[in-house]
Image: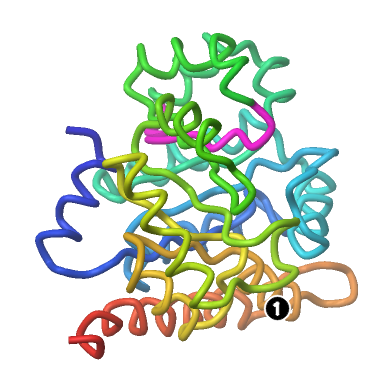
C-alpha cells in the first residue's frame, strides 16, 4: 500500500478528514522552506504538498506566483525540490509528500528519469496541472512504474463525460478545484461543495481533497465535512510573505507563525466531524 493510500485509510479508520498544507520549495530560501517542511507533520499535516517553482504558473494566483518568483531567485530547481524530499525522508518515512508543478520542467528533466529520481527521493504523488489526460503517455507510465500516484484535478466546470475520463486516470486521490479561476482569489460556498461532491463521489472511489479556495480553519472544516481532505496553500504563503523583511529574508518568527497557522487548521479539521456528530 502506498503512503497516500495508507494515510487516507488511517484517516477513514479514525473517522476524520485530513489536512494538506502547501509550501513552495525554496521560498524564500532553502533553509526556511526546509524548516517548514520538517515542522509540518508535528503541526498537524496529514499529507504535504510541495510546489515546484515555474516561470509560467498558469493555475497560480498572485500570492503563489510571488512565492515562485522568490524561490526561483533563490535558486530553486526541480532537482533541488527533490533534494528537499530526500532530506525530509531521513527523518520522516510516513507522511505522504506530493509535488505540484507544471509539465515543462518535467519534460526538460526527462519524464522517465524524473520519475526514477522522484521515487528514490521519496515522492508519493504528482499534481501536474497542465498535463491533460490526452497526454498521459508523457508521464503516467513512468509514474506508475515507480509507484508514484498521478493526482488529477477536477473543476466545477468539468462535465460528466470529462469527469469520467479524468478520474479514470487518477490514482492516490482526486483534487477538487473548488472555484473557477486561479488559486487564492476566492472561496467556494458550502452549498456549492455540497452539490458538487455527490457527482464526484459517483465518478470515483478515490479520496477527494478540496483546494484552491480553502483559507481559514472554518473553511477547512467545511471541506472535510463533505470530502476527505482540505488543501490550504495561499493563506500559508501569505503568512510567510508577511514575515519577510524588505530584502525578502525570513524574519525570526516566520516559520513559527506559519506552523502555528497549520496547527490551527489541523485542530479545526480534526474537530469538524465531531461537531457535526
Q: Quadrant of residue 172?
A: top left
Residue at 49%, 79% in the rendered image: 219
Q: Nearer the viewer, residue 66 or 276?
A: 276
Q: Nearer the viewer, residue 213 or 3?
A: 213
Could you say where residue 263 lies in the image, as x and y percent from the top left?
40, 80
Q: Which residue is mark 1?
A: 251
Task: Tell me if residue 127 comes above or below residue 17 in the rendering.
Answer: above
- The answer to whether residue 156 is left or right of residue 1 is right
Residue at 32%, 69% in the rendered image: 42
Task: Tell me if residue 74 comes above or below residue 188 in the rendering.
Answer: above
- Residue 115 visible in rendering: yes
Looking at the rendering, the stretch of residues picked out in magenta corresponds to: 121-131
Could you say where residue 135 lies in the image, as x and y percent from the top left?
62, 15
Of the 4 image quadrants, the one containing the C terminus is: bottom left
- Name of the residue lying farthest toward the right: 246
Q: Quadrant of residue 62?
A: bottom right
Q: Nearer the viewer, residue 230 or 257?
A: 230
Could you say where residue 168 lies in the image, as x and y percent from the top left?
40, 26
Amino acid at each position: 500500500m502506498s503512503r497516500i493510500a495508507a494515510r487516507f485509510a488511517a484517516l477513514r479508520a479514525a473517522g476524520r478528514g485530513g489536512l494538506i498544507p502547501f509550501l513552495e520549495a525554496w521560498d524564500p530560501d532553502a533553509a526556511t522552506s526546509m524548516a517548514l517542511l520538517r515542522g509540518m507533520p508535528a503541526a498537524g499535516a496529514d499529507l504535504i504538498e510541495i510546489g515546484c517553482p515555474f516561470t509560467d504558473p498558469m493555475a497560480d494566483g498572485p500570492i503563489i506566483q510571488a512565492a515562485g518568483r522568490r524561490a526561483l531567485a533563490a535558486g530553486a530547481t526541480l532537482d533541488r525540490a527533490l533534494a528537499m524530499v530526500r532530506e525530509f525522508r531521513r527523518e520522516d518515512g510516513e507522511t505522504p509528500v506530493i509535488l505540484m508543478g507544471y509539465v515543462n520542467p518535467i519534460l526538460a528533466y526527462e519524464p522517465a528519469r524524473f520519475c526514477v529520481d522522484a521515487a528514490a527521493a521519496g515522492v508519493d504523488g504528482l499534481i501536474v496541472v497542465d498535463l491533460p489526460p490526452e497526454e498521459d503517455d508523457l508521464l503516467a507510465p513512468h509514474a506508475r512504474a515507480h509507484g508514484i500516484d498521478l493526482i488529477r484535478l477536477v473543476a466545477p466546470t468539468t462535465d460528466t463525460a470529462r469527469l469520467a475520463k479524468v478520474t479514470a486516470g487518477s490514482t492516490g486521490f482526486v483534487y477538487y478545484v473548488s472555484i473557477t479561476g486561479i488559486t487564492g482569489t476566492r472561496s467556494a460556498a458550502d452549498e456549492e461543495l455540497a452539490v458538487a461532491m455527490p457527482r464526484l463521489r459517483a465518478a470515483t472511489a478515490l479520496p477527494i481533497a478540496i483546494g484552491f479556495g480553502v483559507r481559514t480553519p472554518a473553511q477547512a472544516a467545511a471541506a472535510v465535512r463533505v470530502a476527505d481532505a482540505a488543501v490550504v496553500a495561499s493563506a500559508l504563503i501569505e503568512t510567510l510573505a508577511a514575515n519577510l523583511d524588505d530584502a525578502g529574508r525570513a524574519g525570526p518568527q516566520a516559520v513559527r507563525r506559519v506552523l502555528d497557522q497549520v496547527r490551527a487548521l489541523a485542530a479545526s479539521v480534526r474537530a469538524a466531524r465531531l461537531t457535526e456528530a
